[in-house]
Every structure is written in structure tokens, then in C-alpha cells.
């Protein structure tokens, strides 16, 4: 097991990465919560423990999850899919907690993918003005990205993650055993988020993913743990330096401005988050190439690496429609259009002055490719 520490001005907590952690969950949580400086010193877990999960995950992993509990926790269910990541779901879950007697000493465990983690974190942030929670991410994407950093929230019809709060978990447990039941498409989409981490801040991680795609896609356990730990370490460093996304942390949004627009334009049903980020990152590469922050060779390497982790669904959309949707992006300040661009490989910047014309040209280029979908490229 590897443990990576996240330290921010408002919170400090461990992220445990390894195989078979779920079987020893209770002793691991007791030890981690007891040693966490932000947790009241208790020798045992709270009496009232709640688990937020999806029916699909619980059907697969409930027996393993409950193995180390002497008293089973109370289970709350959130149906799978972005369409349930809403304020309506939040009210329903808050009322379920209240009916079950949850109080300020209770502990909530978010056990699922990124949607469960985002909703669970927001639920913990607002119920009784804040209770403790733990992240146990079950997808590759959630393990390397959304479970770390304290961002929580839900969607509105007008855009993704427009309502939320910063609320850090007490502990994150990333058990690689959970990836054994992950569909291949989910794995590929998650690997895109790690590839993004390499592009923006870790050239060595990018090279690993560029040259060892086949082994990663075949779920080589040692290599997966190496990539997951490196991705988490990178995000922990960025979050520790910029907890509230006032500067550096914005680089983590590479590909997300256009990616979120794609998700909204397709009704949150056609694309997995990582697939939308892949198409969005290809747009960023086009702008970076035009501006000269990357060379043609670097552009080709990054584009080929992204496509290697496809296929991604085909898109038939209008560039002007997508660009209009990016106006809702949270990184924008008034009329100022901010956009994350790679600077070489292993570095990124937040461009403050990306014009609508630039974004439309780059989006049109991406959509020409996306019209037939991505079939992946050979390694």
C-alpha cells in the first residue's frame, strides 16, 4: 500500500492506494481517522455510519465492503448517471439522513464513481452544516481525480457542477481490486484523466502512458498502481498549493471547458466524462499549436497518445453551439475567456485571452475528426 498525503490550509488527509484494502476497511479507517489532525481523537469509528453508493456497485461489492464491519452501516442509494446528480437528489438524500437519525457526529462514506463521490461530498458538506466523510472511489477516473481535492457538487440544466462546495474527505481509499469489475470503456475514459495529469505537470507519467498503453489497457496491476499513484501525487501537490482554484489549480481543467460543453450538448448521456475531456483536450492542443506553445511534434505525440486510449463516440454537433455553451464555464471572469493550454509536455498555462474565433476554429477541427468517432491508433 502507498499513502499520499494531501495538505491544504483547511484540511490534511491521507490517500491510500493498494490492492485488497476493502477487506480491511474498518481497521484502516480507524487508524487513518485517529491519525488525521483534523479529526477528533477517537479510538473507534462513530456509531452512526452511512454509505452512499449505487445499486450496481453495491450488488458487486457489498459482501467485501461489509466484511470488516461488526455492525452494518446504513446504506443510501443514488441511481447511476449524470441525470441524478441534481439538487432534487440532494434533498431526497438529506431527508433520508434525517429520517435515519444522522447527526453531526455521523460519518458518511461515498462508495462509488465520480458522481457518487461528488454528490456524497456535497451531501456531507451541507447536512447539518457539515459532517465528516470518506471517499472510496470505485472507478479509475474517480481514484485519480474526483476523490481528491475537496470539490463537491451537482449539476443544473444550465451547466455541470454549478452548485457545490469545497469539502475535503477525512480519508481516501483507492482499492485497485475494485477496478477488476470496471467495464473497459470506463477504464479507457479514466486513463484519459491520468494522461491529462502527465500533459500538464508530469512528463515522466506522460512517457509511461505513451509507451505502455497496451499494458495499461490490459490492466497490468503494478503499472496501474504506478500510474494511479503518480496521478494522485500530482493532484495532491497542485491542490496543496492552490486549494480554492485561484490560480495553479486551474491547470487541472485541461480539456474540461469544451468537455463540459460536450456533455451538456449531448444531454449527459452519450459521453463518459473522460471521453468528453479527451475531445476537449484535442481542442486545447489545436489552440496551443496555433499559438506556438507546443511544437508540431509535441502536438502529434499528445494527440496520438489521447487517441490510443479510445475509441470515443462520434459527434455530430455545431462548433458555434459548443462554444456558446463554454460561456457558462466557471473559470471565466465576466467577458474574460480563460483556457488551459499545454506548454510543451509536462507543463501548462491558463491563457487569459483565448478569442471566440480561436476556439471555434479549434472546435471545428476537432469535430471533423469526431464526426466519424475515434477508433484509436496503434501503439
Image (cartoon, grey):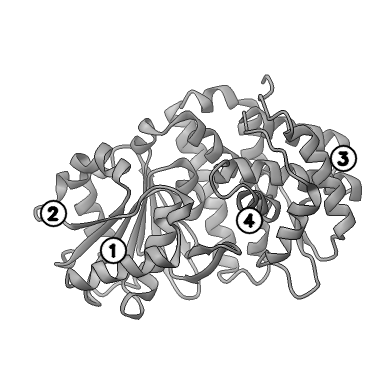
- Please name the residue that numbered disc 3 is placed on: 295
Label 4, residues with CA under 10 Å away: few <14, some 14-19, many ≥20: many
N-terminal of the two: label 2 or label 4? 2
| Residue 343, visible in the rendered structure | no
Residue visible at 65% across and 67% down? 330
Give the CA separation, mark 3 to mark 1. 47 Å
Where is residue 314? Give x, y as percent: 67, 33
- Please name the residue that numbered disc 1 is placed on: 108
Residue visible at 64% across and 46% down? 277
| Residue 181, visible in the rendered structure | yes
Q: Nearer the viewer, mark 2 or mark 3?
A: 2
Give the CA separation, mark 2 to mark 1. 13 Å
Tag 4, which secondary structure? helix
Residue positioned most to the top: 378
Where is residue 200? Give x, y as percent: 69, 49
Give the CA separation, mark 2 to mark 3. 56 Å
Examine the image and state in which quarter residue 162 appears: bottom right
Q: Say left or right for 112 vs 295.
A: left
Residue positioned most to the bottom: 129
- Please name the residue that numbered disc 4 is placed on: 252
Residue visible at 44% across and 31% down? 183
- Please name the residue that numbered disc 2 is placed on: 72
Q: Say left or right for 242 vs 373.
A: left
Amino acid at each position: 500500500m502507498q499513502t499520499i498525503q494531501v495538505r491544504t490550509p483547511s484540511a490534511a488527509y491521507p490517500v491510500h492506494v493498494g490492492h485488497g484494502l476493502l477487506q480491511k476497511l474498518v481497521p484502516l479507517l480507524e487508524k487513518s481517522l485517529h491519525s488525521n489532525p483534523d479529526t477528533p481523537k477517537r479510538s473507534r469509528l462513530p456509531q452512526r455510519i452511512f454509505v452512499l453508493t449505487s445499486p450496481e456497485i453495491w450488488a458487486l461489492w457489498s459482501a467485501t465492503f461489509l466484511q470488516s464491519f461488526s455492525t452494518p452501516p446504513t446504506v443510501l442509494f443514488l441511481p447511476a448517471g449524470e441525470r441524478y446528480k441534481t439538487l432534487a437528489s440532494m434533498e431526497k438524500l438529506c431527508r433520508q439522513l434525517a429520517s435515519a437519525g444522522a447527526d453531526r457526529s455521523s460519518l458518511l462514506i461515498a462508495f462509488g464513481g465520480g458522481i457518487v463521490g461528488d454528490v456524497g461530498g456535497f451531501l456531507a458538506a451541507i447536512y447539518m452544516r457539515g459532517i465528516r466523510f470518506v471517499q472510496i472511489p470505485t472507478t479509475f477516473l474517480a481514484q485519480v481525480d474526483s476523490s481528491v481535492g475537496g470539490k463537491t457538487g451537482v449539476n443544473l440544466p444550465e451547466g455541470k457542477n454549478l452548485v457545490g462546495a469545497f469539502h475535503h474527505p477525512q480519508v481516501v481509499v483507492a482499492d485497485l481490486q475494485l477496478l477488476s469489475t470496471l467495464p473497459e470503456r470506463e477504464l479507457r475514459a479514466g486513463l484519459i484523466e491520468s494522461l491529462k495529469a502527465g500533459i500538464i505537470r508530469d512528463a515522466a507519467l506522460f512517457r509511461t502512458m505513451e509507451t505502455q498503453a497496451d499494458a495499461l489497457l490490459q490492466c497490468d496491476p503494478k503499472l496501474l498502481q504506478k500510474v494511479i499513484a503518480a496521478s494522485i501525487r500530482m493532484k495532491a501537490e497542485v491542490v496543496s498549493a492552490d486549494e480554492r482554484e485561484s490560480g495553479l489549480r486551474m491547470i487541472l481543467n485541461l480539456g474540461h471547458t469544451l468537455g463540459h460543453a460536450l456533455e451538456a450538448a449531448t444531454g449527459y448521456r452519450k459521453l463518459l466524462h473522460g471521453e468528453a475531456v479527451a475531445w476537449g483536450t484535442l481542442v486545447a492542443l489545436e489552440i496551443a499549436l496555433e499559438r506556438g506553445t507546443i511544437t508540431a511534434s509535441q502536438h502529434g505525440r499528445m494527440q496520438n497518445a489521447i487517441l490510443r486510449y479510445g475509441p470515443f463516440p462520434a459527434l455530430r454537433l455545431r462548433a458555434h453551439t459548443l462554444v456558446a455553451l463554454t460561456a457558462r464555464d466557471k473559470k471565466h471572469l465576466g467577458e474574460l475567456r480563460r483556457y488551459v493550454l499545454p506548454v510543451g509536455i509536462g507543463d501548462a498555462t491558463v491563457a487569459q485571452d483565448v478569442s471566440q474565433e480561436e476556439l471555434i476554429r479549434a472546435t471545428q477541427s476537432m469535430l471533423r475528426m469526431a464526426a466519424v468517432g475515434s477508433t484509436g491508433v496503434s501503439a
